[in-house]
Structure formats: C-alpha cells, structure tokens
Amino acid sequence: MKKVALILFLNLFSFKLIYSQVSNVDFIVEGCNIIVTYDLSLNANIELLVALNGDGEFSGPLKEVSGDVGKNVTDGKNKQIKWNVLKEYPQGLNSKSVQFMVRPYSMDVKYIVNDIPFVMKYVKGGSFKMGYCKYSDEKCGKGSDVIKNVYLDDYYISVYEVTQELYESVMGENPSAFKGNKKPVERVSWEDCQLFIDKLNEYTTDQRGSGIFSLPTEAQWEYAAKGGIYSHGYIFSGSNNIDGYVWCSTMRSYSGKTYDVGMVHNNELGIFDMSGNVSEWCLSSPT
C-alpha cells in the first residue's frame, strides 16, 4: 500500500508577522561598544535597529554588529549583540537617549494546536529549474518539457511532515498503519488532507490569521526540497549521499516502515524528510 503523508504550506501574504519571539531587550555601555541583550523564544534571523533622541523612529539595520545577530540565531535567554558604535558612527552618538529594537526577519512561525506544537519554515522566494533530466543541461535543452524555469514568491512550509499526534489532535482519529505520535500520518487521501487543513485553519484563526494553510504546490514543494536559494544542487534533499539523509531500502537501518520525523539530517533550508520516509501530497488535485 502506498504511504502518503501531508506537508503544510503557509502563504506569506495571508497574514501579518508578529514579532512575539523577542522579549526583555536591554543594553549596557562597555567602552566604545554597546551590548544589547534579549531573550528569544524561537529560532530566527535577527537584526538590530536604533532610535536616537527618543523620537521612536528606528533606523537600520545596524551593520557593525556581532554576536547573536544575523541568520539562524538559536532560541534562548540572555542573547547578546555587540555594537561597535564608533565604526558605525565615527563622530560618536550625539543623543540624549538611545532605544534599540531587536527584530526577527524572515522568521519561522510556531503554532500550538491542542498542546501540539509545529513550526513553519520561512522560504525566501526566487527562480529555479523545476523538473529533472538525467542528461546535461545542453542535452535537455532550453525548451525542454522536463526542465522549466520557475519563479516563486516568499512562502512558509512545515519543517516536518504532519505528525500523527498533530493530525489526531485536529481530526480525532489516526488512520496510519504504522502507529507513533512522532511518525508522519499516512494512509490519508488528498481529500482527507483538505478536511484536515480546513479544521486546522479553524484552530489557528486566533493565532495568526484565518485560512492561511494549504498544501504546497508542486513548485513550492520541489523548491523547498532542493534547498531554495541555499541549494547546492544535491541529488537528494540535503546531500549527494543516502546515508543520514534518506530513508530507503539501501540503508542498513531501513525496516520498510515509517520513522519518526526529523531522524535524518535536514536539507539546506532546515527542512526534514523531503527524501523518503513517506510520499507527500501537493496542492494539485489528483487525477
């Protein structure tokens, strides 16, 4: 029996981001540097902005910074950013008051449904070659039906396949053959996925907006699997090697069953199980 699971897609333009991940922002002066501290509840890309003279008009992001700033800052308390003031402002700060904003950008979004958390990964849009050709680009040809250039806007996609515990918390049932809370839900039809998403959207209305989830399009799925703008052109999602990245019959530990999500390495975007474990539905209605 074919094992089909679902992976969620979240449209960037369907809701407004809320910077709720950052709290307890403070700073101290150490010589020519200012140390900004903050707490971060979810992994995010972080930038630092400053407002002078108490006018509340923030400018930036600041460039002469180091520490817990930039891409892929991990969550935790007492994160620190060092700002070299004189490198940024050689003339010094002529201001009676200074305010700082620690701002996530292009960030992941966390949801909790019936005490079950799941995270949506931000995917920066761009152009890519969609499809597969076993020959070189020259042999495939620019007009090939197999390979086509596709542009995508920014979007979000779930870090993991939808787990059985999330599916059951929403639907009240678990149709999977291989049971396990952290295993991907399987034996679900495309229509089952639509019902699940409709109910999920009802649960998440008060958290981030209404009607924001759907299945990914084929292009969105493939772009994410290939690593988006960070793609290294690997054969599999995240590597040219099977071991540690792909669940398949050539692996010594493969048993022909499903596995807990996230047990193999993630790809360039930080997304798991895009090669193997189970098949995944896309938005196009099956024929």
Image: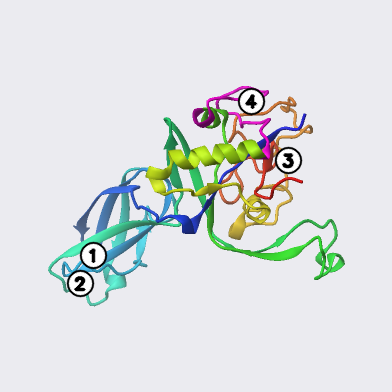
Residue 193 visible here: yes
Q: CA distance from mark 4 to mark 2?
A: 63 Å
Q: CA distance from mark 2 to mark 1?
A: 10 Å
User: Do the residues bearing badges 4 and 2 touch, measured as CB atoms within 8 Å?
Assistant: no
The residue closer to the viewer here, 95 or 172, is: 172
Dot 4 amino acid type: Pro
- Indicate the colouring scheme: rainbow
Residue at image mark 4: 175
Q: CA distance from mark 1 to mark 3?
A: 50 Å
Q: Is residue 232 left or right of residue 36?
A: right
The quadrant where residue 272 appears:
top right
Residue at image mark 1: 32
The residue closer to the viewer here, 27 or 255, is: 255
Within 10 Å of the Cα at label 2, are there few (<14), some (14-19), or many (20+) other Cα atoms?
some
Residue at image mark 3: 242
Residue at image mark 2: 93
Q: Which numbered disc, 3 or 4, marks the residue closer to the eye?
A: 4
Q: Earlier in the sequence, mark 3 or mark 4?
A: 4
The picture places residue 162, in percent across and down from the top left corner, at 57, 36
Q: Which residues are magenta?
A: 169-190
Q: Is residue 274 left or right of residue 121?
A: right
Residue 245 visible here: no
Dot 1 amino acid type: Cys
Q: CA distance from mark 3 to mark 4?
A: 29 Å
Dot 2 amino acid type: Leu
**Which SS does the magenta portion mostly show?**
loop
Q: Secondary structure at mark 2?
A: loop
